[in-house]
């Protein structure tokens, strides 16, 4: 039994949720994986996994062992990458995570330019509107929207985005323009179901209110039933343009429509503070050149791409 291979099989089984799923991921027979996990348990002299018909569960000893195994495998991987020149030459794979719409509009063009400059680097782009854990996903760098909590991540701010409410001129002509957020309760709305924007939050007229990503009791919240609930900002913007209802989105999602006069920003005095956008990565004693090159390239490019956003309109 190769203990490193057995550790990798054990970790994959835990991450995938079953021995069969891990075997498919590793492209090996289930019997081979099962035998190696059994041999590993025999070697350490204790049960690491509890197998049920529905899922795998770690024993207390298994939880500690898998955490140690992950650390060992990561150290071995790092040494292999260093030996292959990854720490002296920009080569190898980078895993980048980012919210879906930010990836399409702002990050992917930067990645495309970067790949042109560094032909020996490959990038895996993970797009999700939920914050993906960098350690669990083996990601190198992430674009994060919203206030950052205390963590070991190294963060560089690259811009700000306003949270805006927009509606079509035709809808506003038909229903009148809301004078305050409370009037939205009787106004047709299109809601994008997003961790950044649900529920809708506004600043109080006296200036109180919090960032839309981390609302507090001081913010004014609108939670009524919308006419349309959607799962993408594009759908919300298109529905708003068609006059279905007003919608709340990050300003870069509707910048073109607003500029073209298809949508108008409303309730601007009640907007919460613009949301920060950061590029974050794990702190490492020795950063691979590929990661350093990407950060050095991406930070100014993203700042340029977001430079026109985040400016609160003057009264």
Image (spheres, rainbow, N blue to C red):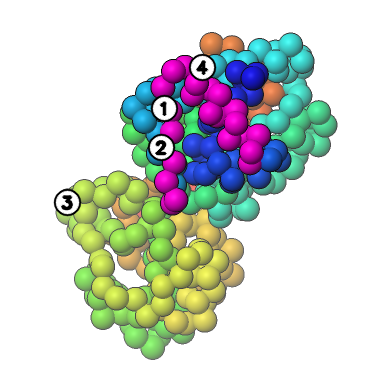
Secondary structure of the residue carrying tag 1 is loop
Secondary structure of the residue carrying tag 2 is strand
Residue 146 at least partly seen = yes
The residue pinned by badge 1 equals 47
| Whole-percent x, y for residue 14 in the image | 49, 37
Q: State the residue lying farthest toward the bottom.
A: 174
Q: Residues within 10 Å of mark 1 (few under 14, many from 20)?
A: some
Q: Residues within 10 Å of mark 4 (few under 14, many from 20)?
A: few
Q: Residues within 10 Å of mark 3 (few under 14, many from 20)?
A: few
Secondary structure of the residue carrying tag 3 is loop
The residue pinned by badge 3 equals 217
Secondary structure of the residue carrying tag 4 is helix
Quarter of the rendering occupied by the N terminus: top right
| Whole-percent x, y for residue 124 in the image | 67, 40
The residue pinned by badge 4 equals 43
Residue 25 at least partly seen = no
């Amino acid at each position: 039994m190769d203990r490193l291979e057995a550790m990798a099989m054990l970790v994959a089984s835990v991450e995938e949720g079953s021995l069969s799923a891990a075997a498919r991921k590793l492209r090996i027979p289930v019997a081979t994986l099962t035998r190696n996990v059994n041999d590993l348990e025999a070697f350490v002299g204790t049960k690491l996994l509890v197998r049920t018909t529905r899922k795998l569960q770690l024993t207390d000893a298994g939880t500690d062992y898998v955490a140690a195994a992950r650390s060992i495998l990561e150290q071995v991987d790092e040494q292999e990458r260093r030996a292959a020149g990854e720490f002296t030459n920009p080569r190898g794979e980078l895993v980048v995570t980012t919210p879906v719409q930010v990836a399409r509009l702002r990050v992917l063009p930067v990645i495309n330019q970067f790949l042109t400059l560094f032909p020996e680097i490959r990038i895996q782009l993970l797009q999700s509107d939920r914050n993906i854990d960098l350690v669990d996903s083996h990601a190198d760098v992430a674009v994060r929207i919203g206030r950052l909590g205390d963590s070991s991540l190294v963060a560089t701010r690259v811009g700000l985005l306003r949270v805006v409410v927009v509606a079509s001129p035709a809808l506003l002509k038909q229903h009148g323009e809301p004078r305050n957020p409370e009037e939205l309760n009787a106004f047709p709305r299109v809601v994008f179901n997003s961790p950044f924007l649900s529920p809708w939050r506004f600043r109080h007229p006296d200036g109180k209110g919090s960032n839309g990503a981390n609302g507090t009791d001081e913010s004014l919240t609108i939670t009524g039933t919308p006419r349309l609930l959607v799962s993408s900002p594009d759908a919300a913007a298109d529905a708003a343009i068609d006059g279905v209802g007003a919608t709340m989105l990050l300003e870069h999602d509707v910048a073109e429509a607003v500029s073209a006069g298809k949508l108008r920003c409303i309730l601007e005095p009640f907007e919460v503070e613009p949301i920060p956008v950061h590029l974050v990565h794990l702190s490492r004693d020795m950063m691979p050149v590929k990661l350093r090159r990407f950060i050095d390239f991406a930070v100014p490019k993203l700042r340029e791409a977001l430079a026109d956003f985040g400016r609160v309109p003057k009264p």
